[in-house]
Image: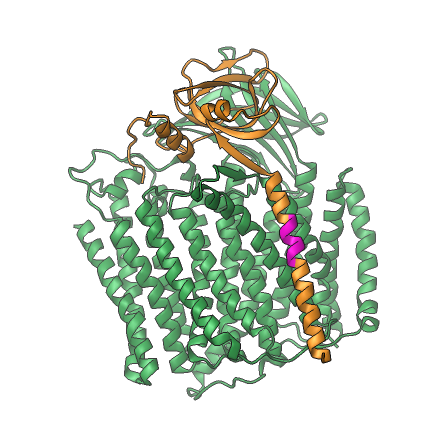
Chain colours: A orange, B green
Amino acid sequence: MTPTRRRRLLAVLLILAGTGTAAWLALGALRQNMLYFYTPSDVVAQGIENGVRFRLGGLVVPGSLKRAGGDLNAEFQVTDRTRTMTVRYHGILPDLFREGQGVIAHGALGADGVMAADTVLAKHDENYMPPEVAEALEKAGHPPAARPDNG
Amino acid sequence: MIGELGQFSLIAALLSALALMVLPAAGAWRGDAALMAVADRAAFGLALFTLLAFVLLAAAFVNHDFSLLYVARQSNSLLPLGYRLSAVWGGHEGSLLLWVLIHAGWTMAIVRFSGHLPPEFRARVLAVMGLIASGFLLFLLLTSNPFERLLPAAADGADLNPLLQDPGLIMHPPILYIGYVGFSAAFGFAVAALLEGRVDRAWVRWARPWTLVAWAFLTGGIALGSWWAYYELGWGGWWFWDPVENASFMPWLAGVALLHSQMVTEKRGAFINWTLLLSIVAFSLSLLGTFLVRSGVLTSVHAFASDPARGIFILAFLGLVSGGALTLYALRAPRLESGEGFNWLSRETLLMLNNVFFAAALGMVLLGTLYPLIADAFGLGKISVGPPYFGTLFTLLMAPVVLLVVAGPYSRWQADRWARLWPALSPVLLTALAIGLTAAWLLAGGAPRAWFGVLGGVWVMLGTLAYLARRRRAGGKLTAGVLGMGLAHFGVGVFVIGASLVESGGLERDLRLVPGESAKVGSYTFVFTGTTTVQGPNFEARQGHFTVLKGEKEIALLEPQKRRYTASGQVMTEAAIDWGLTRDLYVALGEALDDRGAWSVRLYYKPFIRWIWFGALFILAGGFLAAADRCLRRTRAAEAAPQPARPPSGDTAGGALPAVP
């Protein structure tokens, strides 16, 4: 092997080792930070374990929002019109959080079967529904009410 | 009338673009000067008719022409004039028209500033620009026509999304697009060079100023978007690793790698394959970003469209343009000269490391952004990737960059020696350590990340300044290129300090406050004195009043609002910020909790957050300064002189940036 070839081989090996390590690290980090999206029906059907973080999507049940007086604890129910789940959240709800409309909560189930959410997201404008929620409702046989074309 | 005129303008623009795509390329192929000369006029036609269409659409917004579907959706009779104009690009169709307009602007700039290029090369570059313009104009006309009629006309419009009714948002899309679209120039130069098959260092020198300017604009656009998100969304964050943010960040990362790899190719002829590939990749990522944002596959404020035809069209166009360019690259790349070799300790090695780390960061962001889409497409479930994935890996990948960035300019091309490099660097390193440790002790609190951040930032700022001073002392010329590099690297240091201090030292409190109550955040006391009602032009707001005290001293009066927009009934948070060089104080109203006047309130203390955007400003200024170094001056000189037959293609640029003696 000529010195040039040896150098090239070394470079190739180094690059392979580097990319391999980087890919391994990245995939590991990716797995740790992946959040699956479930509807209340999925949560029941798939038997999500307590403490596993996921995203819950559905519609906020009208009349279900309860604010315990004194601090920022909120409790509301999320439905896909087949099953319903209770979500507990401490903090400020987004501007577009409305009863009867689409919402996505990030969190995990507690021992009492209630989801403890650390993030609650609503849609970005009045006409918009998170696509996951719209699709989930459709799958459950309850297409969302015809929505105006918002382009 | 306006609708029909606009439609005609778009069609005329498309015809010009098609002419620009076909005729000059045919001319270059057959060596027909007359055909190649068509490029100038076709480019002019493209720019003129696109501008006309844009002005007509703007006029429709100004005159409240609700017989246009797009205007009826995006505007309202109560919307103030400034926002009516920015509403032109507030939705899908209009923002694509802006895309094409900016692309036409870049094409005209190439026409104007490329007189010194060999005519065949110039014709091919312009033909590639014509191809891209044709694709997007077709897309506009077929799937996203902003001049579509609404009959009967709406009585009033649905109003612009209130999130977009903000001064920061007037400028964010155009500036971002100038950067995004500007990579088409670097792409055009690379493809033209590949088409010629005679790829030497010259094309890099020609392409570099275009890349620099586009990248500087992209930096500005991203920074503006981050700043807007910070004050408008009311969550106090400055970067969310949202897929749409990533869509503009990926071309930026590719741009950083490209700028540094161009240097090596220009000075030493090495990395030429890699530079070509990066030029193609950077623009492909711009197209990918357009696809991600415009196809509606993402859930985001930017995702206007939910029409699958649009997504498929862009994806097909992306496949055609990038796939074609990559095939061309695969055919031609093996035949390229490989340039001069170098030692393991040399400036080439350092620049290569820059490229390795930025390419890795790019791959990491790409994986995290696309993985959920791919998983969804293959039915593996609906996944989202949390920000910690991006945040952790990006910090890890950029740490070595921060460490090495200072050494780059000190090092010599081809071969350097530790015995020379170390004595030059060690005094700077020791001084930076001393100052950095003092600064970290004063500012960083207990968080190790903040300590590393401050140390790294000080090292980059100081090391860069020391390099400029040393070069000056040694009698070297501080050209615009060197100063631009210095400014940009200095900005990296500023950014690193800001980002690490605010990430580890920021404070947030969400609480319930009754008028008269107060809350402490760090050493600041926020007193809630009550709310009043305020009437805006197209909204009504509840305005909170907060007095901020430090000790006994009153330092700020903050008045955040909760707005309800009349037309849409949409509710919006308008945060109030008292900004300073070393800290921001930030209040956002949540919601009214009961009839006693209690509100949920978000209070933030954000140390050094402004440094993030100041850093970005330095970086973009550096980009512009470096672009001014050779391109514009040289072009003018070339135009003043009688047309040279062909600029020298050898190693003539080597003297522009000599290594420090």
**Left or right of A13, for residue B427:** right
**Left or right of B200, for residue B401:** right
Q: Which residue occupies 40% across, 71% down?
A: B110
Q: Verify whether residue A23 appears in magenta.
A: yes
Query: Is B135 situated above or below B294?
Result: below
Viewer-side residue, B579 vs B461:
B461
x, y (%) of residue B70?
27, 43
- How many numbered discs, if any? 0
Asked if residue B321 shows in the view, the reply is: yes
Q: Which residue occupies 43% across, 80% down?
A: B196
Magenta region, residue range:
A19-25
x, y (%) of residue B378?
44, 44
Viewer-side residue, B494 vs B583:
B494
Q: Verify whether residue A21 appears in magenta.
A: yes
x, y (%) of residue B394?
63, 49
Q: Main secondary structure of the magenta part?
A: helix
Quarter of the image that includes the C terminus of chain B: bottom right
